[in-house]
Image (cartoon, helix red, strand yellow):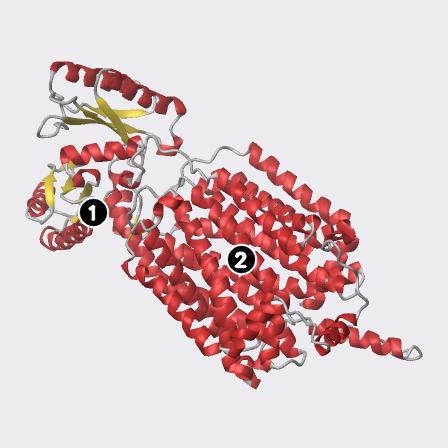
Amino acid sequence: MATFLYKLGRFAFRRRAFVALMWVALLTLAGVGAATAPAPGATSFSIPGVEAQKAFDLLEQRFPGASADGATGRMVFKAPEGQKMTDAANRATVDRTVKSLSGGSEVVSVADPFTTHAVSKDGTVAYASVRYDARGMELKDTTRDTLKKAADDARAAGLTVDVGGDALQAGAEPGAAGEVVGLALAAVVLVVTLGSLVAAGLPLLTAIIGVGIGVSTITTVAKALDLGDTTSTLALMIGLAVGIDYALFIVSRYRSELAEGRDREEAVGRATGTAGSAVVFAGLTVVIALAGLAVVNVPMLTKMGLAAAGTVVVAVLIALTMVPALLGFAGRKVRATGEKRRPRGSEAGASAASAASGQAKPGPGVRWASFVIRRPAAVLLLGVLGLGAIAVPATQLELGLPDDGSQPTSTTQRRAYDLLSEGFGPGFNGPLLIVVDARDSDDPQAAAASVTDGIKHLKDVVTVTPAAFNKAGDTATITVIPDSKPSSTQTEDLVHALRDQGAEVRSDTGAQVLVTGTTAMNIDFSQKLNDALIPYLGLVVGLAFLLLIVVFRSILVPLKAALGFLLSVLAALGAVVAVFQWGWLGGLIGVEETGPIMSMTPIFMVGVVFGLAMDYEVFLVTRMREAYVHGESPSQAVVTGFRYSAKVVAAAAIIMMAVFGGFITAGEAIIKTIGFGLASAVFFDAFIVRMAIVPAVLALLGKKAWWLPKWLDRALPNVDVEGEGLRTRDDAVSAKDADPDDDRELVRV
């Protein structure tokens, strides 16, 4: 592989104008497609195979035209102090509001609170339900404006009015200011690390072009493939981070090759052949982790993973082609200020002379690696115990999906949620919908009555509405109001109890009972993700383990990498629980409300963190492997790896943390949570696992770390990540130069 990428890098360098124009043309094409593409609607949320989804699909069939997936709005009224909603003036205000809401083109129905008995027992709170024929994010602006104006008019009449439901749902707010701050911090780190504005600008420019192509392509196909705003935001987050890092590693290696005295074209070829090989395998691990989300069998999660994986592929291709091309345009300006070109071979001699004279001044990476090698057991124990302590909160992880109760108290949705809880009880915000499929029952009415009677005797039930049948009379719906809030364990227990009772009803009457509704769907979604986590881990870790065996030609190094990843992700989940569930230091990052962690956060973090963790493993350990293959002792190889890679890996980690940290300012809960979780995971993995635990383990294992059974060594393909083929080529060229009369053809490598 190193030889192929070496040739690719030299080709891109020589044909730099063509390569640069090709990528600019792709960016332009993707941008035009995004600009002319139809606006995407709301992402459809379905969970194949779970009971709540089956019930929802059944409702679509048996109650046609009911707009079961349409948006809903709840306008909640509260009477002034000392008054009741049934007072004549307040009742007149509600009547005017209901009439003003009824005339919209997208309105299916408006329920008058005084005819539907939607008034609290003390008479102080009432609500009007509005149903629409379009989903929340697909509603017209005029429809939302009508809803807001009706609320404002009612407030002007003296009532307290707030609106809940998904009718006011808006698109994701990715936190543009945070992204700019993240990019600015990344630029500062690049300048400090590389010491040249030109060298620092290359990774930023190529990363922006890469995510521009990726996100624009996603926007172009969003309508056709049903992709939501969150998909683009996550692709942007991951694409920026890996795009900057991949380019940084190639630019850094190019500067090292220049410093050793090679000409620019040769330096580009070698940088692409060696660092580029690491980029390819690092990118493959990220793609495997993201594409592997398909095993969860949640369409929305699959699309998010594949879209982000596509952006990573673009980042890898740009690093291998456009970065060498831009290095050709940059000339020698990529060198740090004051850096002089040394003749080849002078570096080793200068180092030896400095060492002999006692003037050697090793960098911080070398000093740290030397310290770890002297105290490997202590460093390993401290690192494992420290991450283990941070991971402890993860044992209390509670999963759920956000509802209006998780919104900031400054939002009208949250205030409406609180008013409904005050007037009707906390369970009123999470009603359960029971669907009775009595098509195979001899007496559908009796079957529905049996279900209703059974529900009334269950614990934690406040209200059970009478069964409402469809026109055919074979399917009924029953609404159950729990006594507990939607995200509570009591409500989850009630859902399970309802399903257990449904099994008994089917055996007695032949009717099938299904439990659905937003609360039940959230419970099923969380359970499905929990059930899929172990198979997903097995698939992703297993495939990446095999890939790393090929890269490192070792059994223990990939095993160590996988175990280190588990420490990183558990510690990151512990930090997420402490901040977003327990509220520790949450005010510092704008966490106004604590509660259950988004259901998809753990499995998504597992995928992304694993890919990024393997990035650092590949970048750091391949340089150690390269030194070991070239004759250094295991301990010397560890120090050499840190000498050449520690600074750049640390810079890459800080850049990733800055990019991910920028998304903590996002308005959408999942983006904020994942941004914080990924930034934490990168810190733990890069600076504790890869910089401390990995060298400690390698020092303890010695030569055993690089052991591989002979039969397996023969069976594995030789991908040559270390650039051994390039060294063989150099030796052949040197031999030819030493014997100019030797007309034997050089062996092509």
Disc number lying in front (1 or 2): 2
> Is 623 or 194 nearer to us in this picture?
194
Q: Classify mark 1: residues with Cα within 10 Å, few (<14), some (14-19) or many (20+).
A: many
Q: Image check: 384 left or right of 66?
A: right
Q: Is residue 730 visible from the viewing direction of this image?
A: yes
Residue at (32, 23) in percent of width and height: 148
* Total numbered labels: 2
At label 2, the amino acid type is Ala
> Quarter holding the N terminus?
bottom right
Label for residue 603? none
* Above/below status of 5 relative to 164: below
Label for residue 515? 1
> Is 83 or 607 nearer to us in this picture?
83
User: Label 2 belongs to which residue?
Assistant: 653
Determine whether the residue tagged by mark 2 lies in a helix, strand or loop. helix
Cβ atoms under marks 1 and 2 closer than 8 Å: no
